[in-house]
Image (tube, rainbow, N blue to C red):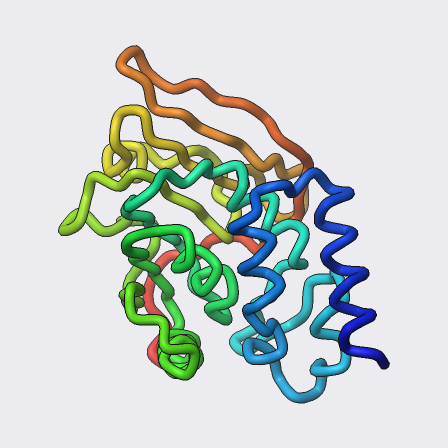
Amino acid sequence: FDMNESKALLMLKLRQNGVSNPEILKSIETIDRSSFISKNFLSRSLEDIPLPIECGQTISQPSLVAFMIQQLEIPYRSKVLEIGTGSGYQTAILSRLSLRVYSIERYKKLVDMAKIRLANLNISNVIILLMDGFFGYSLQAPFDRIILTAAVEEIPNLLIGQLKVGGIMIIPVGLSNQKQSLLKVVKTEKGLDIKELMSVRFVQMKEGLVRI
């Protein structure tokens, strides 16, 4: 297991998958994914695969994280809402590209762990909230960008309401046992411009808080 060789292979795969944004590539290269996964999977941290994390959730493969973030087209000094903090890995990458990230997670254990991981990386422009993602975060709305890491049955009107005109939302839509599509939703003066990006498989978004 050669760390440098594994990282070089991962970076090559990202470029082959169309990830060209230098800031995103630099963030994936410098943010150590092994800090966000359990010891059982440390040797696989640089593989481009999803891995299980606490609370029955998963950390997406780096190429998908990078692709989704690139599709957000995050402008300079923007405010981003992330629904589904999970391990905090995607949150850390978003923090390098945004002025401020508000990240919502329904599992208290994941919130606590993500806060520690980000603090260890000296990331200070992220606020992680133990909340129900379905409601977004109206206190800081509107957001320049919104990204979801769990699938919903349909695009939530409540979250569209918290997106700026001209803003972009990246969202997996579909049921967990059926076809899911990753959608790029641009909010315009006239309504929504929706583009299907790729087929994906995400855990289903659930309601309510879990305080364990």
Where residue 50 appears, as percent x and y from the top left, is 69, 63
Image quarter where the C terminus lies is bottom left
Count of residue discs: 0
Please tell me whether residue 186 is drawn above or below residue 29 in the rendered image: above
Please determine whether, in this image, residue 74 is positioned above or below residue 157. below
Say which residue appears at 46% left-offset and 36% top-offset: 73
Decide: is 169 above or below 44. above
State the image quarter where residue 44 is shown.
Answer: bottom right
Point 50% across, 71% down: residue = 87
Q: Residue at x 42, y 33 (%)?
A: 155
Residue positioned most to the bottom? 39
- Horizontal side of 12 relative to 155 (left or right) equals right
Residue 146 occupies quadrant: top left
Residue lying at the far right of the rendered structure? 1
Image spot of residue 36 (x, y percent): 55, 76
Where is residue 86? Give x, y as percent.
48, 67
Give the quarter of the figure containing the N terminus: bottom right
Residue 29 location (% of width, % of height): 62, 63
Give the camera-side residue of 10 and 162: 10
Quarter location, residue 172: top right
Q: Residue sitting at 57 percent across and 38 percent down? A: 174
- Left or right, 136 with respect to 25, comes to left
Specify the farthest residue to the left.
139
Task: Please indicate whether residue 41 sits to the left or right of residue 173 in the image.
Answer: right
Q: Residue at the top extreme?
A: 190
Q: Is residue 6 left or right of residue 117?
A: right
